[in-house]
Amino acid sequence: MTTTSPGVAPDTGTAAGPVIECDGLVKIFKVADLEVVALQGLDLIVDRGEFVAIVGASGSGKSTLLSILGGMDVPSAGRVVVDGHLVAEMDAAERTGYRRSVLGFVWQQTARNLLPYLSARENIELPMLLEGVPRKRRRARSAELLELISLNDRADHRPGMLSGGEQQRVAIAVALANSPAVLLADEPTGELDTTTAHEVFELLRDVNRRLGVTILVVTHDPLVSDQVSRTIAIRDGRTSTETLRRRALTAAGDHHVIAEEYAVLDRVGRLQLPRAQIDALGLHRRVRLVLEPDHIEIWPDGGEQPDDGNGPGPAGDPSAAEPAPDRGPT
Amino acid sequence: MGRVWAAAFLMRRLRSERGVLVLLVLLVAMTSLIVAAAPRLYNSVADAGLRHVLDETSAPSRNIALTRDLEAAPSSLTPDALQAQGADLVAPFDPAIKAVVRSQEVLVASARFHVNPGPKYDTFVTLRSQTGLDRETELVAGRWPARVIEQPASETPPVIEIAISTTTAEESGLAVGQLLEATPDSTDPLAPIRGGEVAAQLAIVGMFAIRDAAADIWYADNRLEHVGLAFTLNEATAFATALVAPEVVPDLAALGLGVHIEWRLFLDPARMDAGAIDALLPALQRLESQFGRQSVRATDAVLLRTDLARVLIRYGAQRSASDAVLTVAAIGPLALAAAAIGMLAILLGTRRRASTALARARGASTGILLLSQTWEGAVFIGAAALAGYGLAVGLVPGRASLTSAILSGGIALGGIAIFVAAVLPALRRPLELSARDVTPPARLAPRRFVLEATAVGVSVAGIVLLQQRGLTIDPNGGGLVHVDPFLAAVPVLAGAAVGIVTTRLYPIPVRFLGWLAAHARGIVPVLALRHVARRPSFAALPILVLLATAAFSSFALLVMTSLDRGQVEASWRAVGADYRIKAPEGRSLNDIDPTTVGGVEAVAGAYELPSAQMRLELGRVVRVDFVAIDAPGYAAVAGAPVAPSWPAELLDGRVAAGTPEDPIPAILSSSLPAGVEPIKVGERVKVRLGDNFWSFRIAAIRPEFPGVVEAPPFLITPIQSVRPLSTSVTTNRMWVRGTAAAGPEIADLVTRDGPPSTELLSRDAWYVQLRGEPLIQVIADGFRLAFALAAGYAAISIIVALTLTAARRSEDLAFLRTLGLSPRQSAGIVVVEHGVPILLSLLPGLATGVAVALLLESTLGLDAFLGGSTRYRVVLDWGGVASVAALLVAVVAVAIGVSTWLARRVSLSEALRVGEA
């Protein structure tokens, strides 16, 4: 599906090879006597420098995915590679170092991103201190990041003295302290008002653009997801669709954004059809696939067989259908 | 190094988290102060106990004397020569002994002389020269004796000037100015057998008074003050002692008679402390092996006369017993102190959980976080423990003790370990759960079950071992016992074991109560009891603490009460009535009538003849303590705890003749000297009274007769039958029943109308004196202090435990309040949730304490603190136990009140955002 909209041009990012590769990720939680399968063989590839939004309904598995990518949880099965690190095979000590140097994390709750007893500058310096960065470099880097987030004058304020938006900006700076390859953000604007959310998001875009940090944002906010170059929808523990946005020029020379929704094809050829499309055509149980020279057609089970050039017949009347010519495997 | 800096960086959390940490620091400091002060205070008590024991011991026992009986050359008996000989004898003494010697005096005594004339009695006089009497005597007539330079003609016996005491003069009839012919008494080993020729003339030139007959210098020998009188049917003989000048001693040797020399070393109790005993005792024992003991007179050998080593061993045994019992008392509050410190550390760890999770998420390793926690613990808890120790050293009087430093160090290390351990759950909690703010489900892990079962098993084993072995072990068999720390902890372990079982079982009655509540009106009990029943771990911590406190408190109360009752019983055993009057040997109390004193309700008299000859049916003669007593009178004055039962025939007042046909009924002790066949009821014995043996029939056999006789073997019989048998049978013992106010008047009566040296003993005074003995008083004081500390620490632990649980519950209660629950109902839920399980644990706790006290009745070694032969028995003071229960309920009520107040300080909106903020 393709949509076109004028306005803010989405980031195209700098594609330079995958920085995140998830292959058949499975995560099963055991809560009391129940087993919950949060991820059911999720595949994901994110290229270096991309700005990606992950969307999905509650319980779809997006927070679980973020936990695994963040090294806070271990998948039950599957392969995860982040910036060349095999996350699933790391021990606890390796994951600690991974969280310190490869990743940055921003949570939704502003108060959970910062240690309340440290100032903004000290919160930014903490990851560098843990990494063993010398004091001089820490100072310089924290000054640089404070400049980036435009909070030089609030450097010595503790989180209790900062607004929600300022806290999130500091949280972003903290996440960037050790120049991570990837920045993960879990609903970073969830607690903010529209204006502040916009400011924070702009900062993230700025960070992506200027520093080339790959950013993965989990969000419910369509304002966020509509402004990234790529939105991945997760449904039932798997990636279902991706929406790619690109800038194009109209005939009149105006910029507009074209959003194209794709169904994600996993490596064994499975894909999830969008729910709306399934419901619209009444698809259920099985469908017929028809291979054309340049596309594959999907027909409801029992619908009229396509002929050469007459297009597909009406769906749902099996008695009216003529036997379909054998055009290939179904 | 980077890790160290990172760990230090994380300590900046102290900028905002101070309250709980300050509480923790104060608690550690206070605990360290208490554990450091206790050994110092106990050292003071131990030293006071040693001085008390020494004060109660006679001078000859607690000092050291070297004696020598010899026929010596006059030149070796000059004052300077005697001093030099003494110095030579003392020179090789161990420095530990020399360090406690205050002064050294010399006494020289001559052989006994028979003097003529003897004014009142046939009189024998011993001449004595003694140094150190300048301040102890006062010349009241004549002058001090000197050496007579110009002696009469050679055929005339030499004149020796003497002085006598005023009491000697009064008792013997001797007076200043008399000249007595002195003939050596051939029965004295110091006087060689010779004819009855006069050896010297004794000129009484002076009379002196003795300032303080009880002073140490006299060495418990009153012969210089008093005359010893020996009475037979026909005559009386007086034995007197007189002072001569030191320069006269060589002249005594010149008479050809032997002399008795005694170098007396007076030890200074102020220089002796309980800590010095370890060096002093072996030195004394070496001394004893170096010199022979003065038990048999041996001419010319230097013999040792002291009982100090045995006194110190007895003291050491009592002190060890006191150590052992106090260790039991101390472990209870120590365990509760650890619980209180642990609770505060857990509270602090809980409050830091979110920031700990964030630091982990930012890449802080477990090592860095542990290092930070350890560093913080070392700085604050270590400093607090050191401050407590310093305060104890600076403020608490008492001898320094290594135990203080060890205990304070233990508090520091233990506190730091607990502090670090409190952060472990946050470090072990999966990060993804922290991120989702989910509490992992609580399950009874097999490991925990095994640990709990092991704890219960260990405490059961401890109880069994303690019953079998007792609290102390005596590895060397010398009476110096050591306490086994594991066994001393048994009461606390038992409380903990019962606590563990109670935390598993208490949901059963709670569920039943919840079922009952569901049938009644009111939502508060239903909500509260269902919550407790479905989440039993909710109240586990307060239950454990309260149960251990209740167990220890009831145990301590019963020990204190039983000790007190035992001491009261011991006082009745020792005295026999409110007052006991005892005449000196050979004297009577016939002139004393206590019934004339206001407040005296009854009097009973008796005649006691120690070491009376008792002839058995087979002809063997044994020595017994013979007491002829006014039995009905004594039954009226005796006290309830030890009131003996009398055979009816001793109470009927019948006068038996004491002949084989009409023997006098008597009570015989079951314990007789070794080798004597047991005597049965109905058999007859004969006792010598005066010059004759009289017949007695055994009417009853008893193992003891407390209050009347101290120890077997004894024979007790009614006085009305014995009095006619001999004129020597007079009343020389009296028991008086009277009020405390009558005491001073009775004392005046005894002093005025009784013979000299009559002993008046008050049961109250005996009881007070017993309890006043430092090592006995410290037991009661120690248990009282332990009880107070246990209650205090328990209160802190319970408040903190309830604060922890209230914090977790505040979100649930806030949610209920959004549904319409009122603040009062919310508070009611807190009260019921905490109060019901805690009160359910109170009963098992109290029962455990009572059970432990009963189980360990014979193994705590408390007999040593009752005096005499009284056995320690547990007295079930239910009123006291109820008071303990009431006190603990009050503590719990305060704790619930405080935690409820703290919880209500959190607003509804804040409570509902817990997990999001």
Image (spheres, coloured by chain):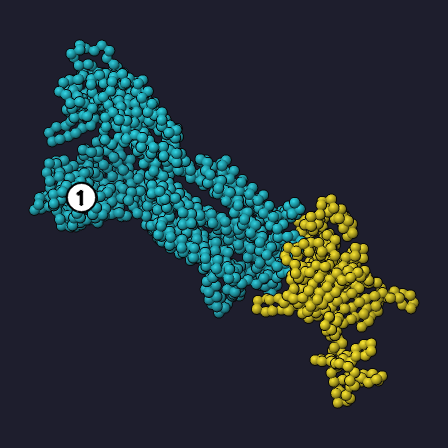
Chain colours: A yellow, B cyan
Residue at position x 15%, y 12% in the image? B155
**The furthest residue to the left:** B661
Residue B899 visible in this rendered orientation of the protein: no
Q: Amino acid at mark 1?
A: Leu
Q: Nearer the viewer, residue B567 or A122?
A: A122
Quarter of the picture containing the N terminus of chain B is top right
Left or right: B539 as drawn, with respect to B460: right
Please report, as a chain letter, where disc 1 is located: B
Residue B743 is situated, as x and y percent measured from the top left of the image, at: 28, 37
Left or right: A224 as drawn, with respect to B76: right
Q: Is residue B820 above or below residue B87?
A: below
Residue A160 is situated, as x and y percent measured from the top left of the image, at: 69, 51
Residue B579 is situated, as x and y percent measured from the top left of the image, at: 26, 40
Q: Nearer the viewer, residue A62 or A47?
A: A47
Residue at position x 45%, y 64% in the image? B509
Left or right: A298 as drawn, with respect to B831: right
**The furthest residue to the right:** A252
Residue at position x 30%, y 31% in the image? B306
Name the residue beneath numbered marker 1: B715
Residue A180 is situated, as x and y percent measured from the top left of the image, at: 73, 55
Q: Is residue B280 above or below residue B569?
A: above
- Name the image quarter holding residue A257: bottom right
Total number of numbered labels? 1
